[in-house]
Image (cartoon, coloured by chain):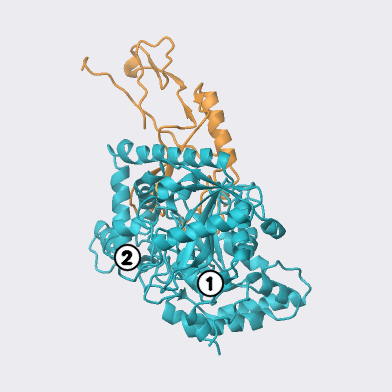
Amino acid sequence: MTDYETVVGLEVHAQLKTESKIFCSCSTKFGARPNSQVCPVCLGLPGALPVLNERAVQFAVMTGLAVGGEIAERSVFARKNYFYPDLPKGYQISQYDRPLCAGGGVDVHAEAPGGGSGWSGSSSRRTRGSRFTPKVARA
Amino acid sequence: MTHEAGREETAESIGHSVGSGAESALEVARRFVERAERTASRLGTYLHRDPEVTLAMAREVDARIAKGEKLSPLAGVPVALKDNLCTHGIPTTCGSRILEGYRPPYDAHVVERLRKAGAVITGKTNCDEFAMGSSTENSAYFPTRNPWDPERVPGGSSGGSAATVAALEAAISLGSDTGGSVRQPAAFCGVFGLKPTYGAVSRYGLVAFASSLDQIGPIARTARDVALLYNAICGRDVRDMTSRAEAKPIAVEDVERGVKGMKLGIPRDLIAEGVDPEVLASLERVAKTLAEEGATILDVTLPHARYSIATYYLIAPAEASSNLARYDGVRYGFRAKGASDLQQMYAVTRGKGFGREVRRRILLGTYALSAGYYDAYYLRAMKVRTLIRKDFTDTLARADAVLLPTTPTPPFKLGEKLDDPLAMYLNDIFSIPASLAGAPALSFPAGMTRSSLPIGMQLVGRPFDEGTLLRVARTWERRNTDALRVPPIAAGARA
């Protein structure tokens, strides 16, 4: 086992506290009547176009700054194409090679099971006092 | 029998007479509906046409006028809409089986604007499936015929929109132009067709084909009518992130200002080969007339424009392959019966729901974008596109507009190029460069061949300078009053 290094990646999803959805003006209010907060854009109907929520971008940038990441001067959205019945447009609007923020990290310190020597890790390229070299993996 | 029926009937004159109370919107609508009843099924201009809906819209306009509401210059003007523009509750199929019976729950931005302006919708016009084609023969339902010669194509993909205006079934119409789909049919049908600057008109509610190229454009029988329709639809709309506030209405008086002191460039390098002699003769006639009116004619070059078709047939199908992914049979439109699992349902639905040309382009685009090929195809095409755009920027620093034919030949016969996709694609050699550059481009009627087929000339201008193009075309139009000719099928049908 000493030849191997354990690398654990976390993909963290967080719902942003915006008034409206990320690509249309429909409300995000919880508990409304079914189908009352949908429109041609979020249904992916023919002819509808997405408009990016400015507040969502602000939140993403704030998150990037909070973890010491780099904020891109120029960022690009990309389509991830695949067929699936829950995917009305046939693609997700995502980011690929030019995301809003990259890098940064959150240090994690924890006791090893059985009270052995502690370990620490970070998702960042920067490491502080860790005897491990964390790897950054793309989810 | 005269060819003059309806000759002077322009959107502008109708708007005046409805606005001044000389005629009701209902009377106008009845006249256009009657004409369409006689010719529309023979020409195949409409996919969906409901006279009751048209007449009800006209009554509503009259009621608004009676209440003292101040309407636009398009009040009571019959307008036809290409079937890829979403209309609330009215079928919108894009000429495809896969959207058969689909009724959108919303209006496209341009449709909203036209309703507000008091225009009256005559119906949804036939087109090549998902706007892919140059002859309207790729409609899944039936082809449209050229009003000037029903054995010939009206061009495409907005063939129905151009033919219905030429045949006076509608005063004006909207089409969409991705590589020439407004300009080429306008040229083939002897009417005006404008592809506005990329970003000048909101595409919210236009069913997407190739998003970096698609523009909605007006079709009309006079330069002034083009301006009126453009004014009703242009400008910023928050629902389309590419729409721009720089797109401002054109003062119709400015269209009359002539060409004195203007510089017009002819790209002779591009026009060197394969152009019909009658089209070339027409170009020279137009250039001579505009020179007499005070314009300076220059020779210019667009050195990369000859790569346009190769570039376009990578970029447009790539974007289409993604845009058309949503037609999968899951939520609306056509779904193939009898599939045993999901994969088979997708495959059979899309295999049967899309026609040959659409399937061809989805395959081309998917291939060009697939892993390992992206850099060699799509990325390279984007670089060539930048060079083509630069050709126009350089040329339009020296000239106010570029003048060239809209198409290399007059309208061809139905079936003539249907089995030869490459020959069909080559018909767009003069219209695709402006699309790739995002520049505004106008096709205007420039006379007829000896066998009475329309010839169209094209002007390409600086971004958001549609006004200059209309000024030049209006100058030619004033010297050639035959621009308002009516084809025999429309004139002969007069009561």
Q: Which residue is mark 2?
A: B353
Frontmost residue, B353 versus B262: B262
Residue B313 showing in the rendered view: yes
Residue B46 horizontal/vertical position (percent): 46, 75
What is the number of the mark on residue B306?
none
Residue B263 vs residue A138: left or right?
A: right
Q: Pointer 2 indicates a residue of which chain?
A: B
Q: Pointer 1 indicates a residue of which chain?
A: B
Residue A87 horizontal/vertical position (percent): 39, 52
Frontmost residue, B74 versus B430: B430
For numbered disc 1, what is the local secondary structure? helix
Depicted A101 relative to depicted B490: above or below: above
For numbered disc 2, what is the local secondary structure? helix
Chain coloured cyan in this rendering: B
Q: Which residue is mark 1?
A: B165
Name, please, the residue furthest toward the right. B68
Q: Residue at x 41, y 22 (%)?
A: A123
Chain coloured orange in this rendering: A
Few, some or many residues within 10 Å of mark 1 (<14, 14–19, 20+): many
Residue B258 horizontal/vertical position (percent): 66, 56
